[in-house]
Amino acid sequence: MYKLKHFLLSIFTITLVNSHISIADEFETKHALSVFENIKYNKNFKNFDYVNPNAPIGGKVKLAERGTFDSLNQFILKGLPASGLENIYQSLLKTSLDEPFTAYGLLAKEVSIPENKLSVIFHLHPSAKWSDGKQVTAEDVKWTFETLIDKGHPYYKSYYADIKNVEIINKNSVKFNFLSSTNRELPLIIGQMQILPKHFWYDKKFTSSGLIIPIGSGPYKIEKLDPGKMILYKRVENHWAENLPVNKGYYNFDSIQYDYYRDAYVMIEALKAKQYDFRHENISKEWATSYIKTLEENPSFIKEEIAHELPQGMQAFIFNIRKEIFQDINLRKAINLAFDFEWTNKTLFHNQYKRSKSYFSNSILASDELPKERELEILKKYADYLPSEIFIKPYSVSVTDGSGNNRKNLRTAQKILEKANYTIKNNILTNSQNKNIEFEILLLSPAFERIVSPFINNLLKLGIKCTQRIVDTAQYKNRLDNFDFDMIVMARGQSLSPGNEQRNYWTSKMANIKGSSNWIGIENKIVDDLVEIVIKAPNKEELINSTKALDRVLLFNHYLVPHWHIKKWRLIYWNNIQRPHNLPKYGLGFPNIWWHNEYN
């Protein structure tokens, strides 16, 4: 999968007045960047292999979302952003979907990196335009970065923490200076930044959510909306980048519409009634039972499973360890034993899933067996502070026979609790401080009720009082942002190149910053160190081993109750839309590389 570079590299000397680039600085100018220099497409490539470069242009695709929206600004903490806003913006670079982490020029025609790796220069495409016709400039790039840091979602400060400052070299060139040369993916991370128009925001309050229709440089613009109910994007005619190699075969629909529904069941019925065109089904019961009659009656209705190679990350019930009761690892271990996956998979999921045992499931980054060689070397540095079991047995999840009788695991859980000085009083489990063990599972989707209820029944057998509560999208986001929950369902995807985003997920610095994704509330110095080792991994081998070490430490702290994953896309759609024959390894590409059949 990893190939040698096969594109021309040019070394040149930059001599610029009023900049911090010395005359002797040597820069390597490239058309693309890769984490470990494995670039598939050469400088003169025509299009990505996975697209249909001759896909017809036209037609409308209608999609469905659950919940509501009240904002058109996805870059701040406040508000619920509408779906599809990424279509109106573009980034400096565009990631390909058939390589682990490689990106090619988009707003930036070329990229220059010095030999010391302490900066990166993006040379903007001179034809890059905003939808109002104004040129995209280096000033826009600098303003975007500084605005996201100062006024954007708290996530950005963590994500871009290794950037020292930004300099404008000239109208079309902008330089990012780094604090060190050890963050291998930092130039690509910057390249993924969606660039905003400074002139549009100049007289507007960026921190206000609201429904001011923004402009962008992307292939679509907002045509109309019905607040909270519908948003329609229209394809930009004669878009400045439509003939770039990275965009060939992309953005084939004339318009994309998102309709909002309050209920998941209503969404499914609306799809069968052809009220919208496409659904990525993530509810196993619906996949197995809900579409049978419609498929029999309508040959134009398509149900399709497609295998993929995407890492599956981790889905789980997670503990909010800011809560006093969950700070005890013994209680967390016992609660893990109350979840009967085998019965759940057989009875509720039609045996469609595999149990997850890693934060990086379905990838070479997942820890397994015992740590060895380089991973063991990394972990040994923390041996005095890690559980001894991490070195003598692999991480494992509880297993049952699927009968629904979880007695053996519950007995084991009781022994753990008794040893940790928990007692039963009036049928309620109490800890050594005489505090009752009771908590609430906060849910967004009613589909999880049937999964949570048997779990609650098993917890009750341990004397643990657990309840569930379903809230709407706005309430759920607000409670997550403020860490106002006991337990939730986390579904966290991962890439094959974990990096800066891991700080936001697991580190102490983010544990008490509202809006961060460290929902668990982890404040663990070893985890902090391992995240930095992952970020600074100089090569693929070190990345794999350091990520495995991080995965193993997270697992053995029992911060969550692992769920399940599936290595397939489960798609339901009407045949008025069509996909490329060979989808890419690492993405579905919907709706961007699909097209409308009527225009064939």
Image (cartoon, rainbow, N blue to C red):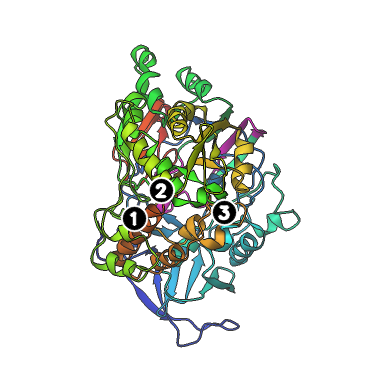
Q: Residues within 10 Å of mark 3 (few under 14, many from 20)?
A: many
Residue at 45% x, 84% y: name it. Answer: 25
| Location of residue 306 with respect to 435 vertically, above or below | above
* Quarter of the view holding residue 185: bottom left
- For disc 3, the marked residue is 516
Is 243 magenta? The answer is yes
Residue at 40% x, 79% y: name it. Answer: 115
- For disc 1, the marked residue is 100
Q: Residue 560, can we see it?
A: no
User: Residue 413: horizontal and vertical position, in percent?
Assistant: 38, 41
On residue 419, which mark appears?
2
Residue at 34% x, 67% y: name it. Answer: 383
Find numbered disc 2 in the image and state the secondary structure of the residue it sits on: helix
Residue at 36% x, 49% y: name it. Answer: 97
Q: Amino acid at mark 2?
A: Lys
* Marks 2 and 3, the one that precedes in the sequence: 2
Q: Residues within 10 Å of mark 2 (few under 14, many from 20)?
A: few
Query: Of circles 1 and 3, which is in front?
Result: 3
Question: In this orientation, which residue lies closer to the viewer: 26 or 282?
Answer: 282
| Location of residue 148 with respect to 277 vertically, above or below | below
Stretch in magenta = 225-251
Q: Amino acid at mark 3?
A: Ser
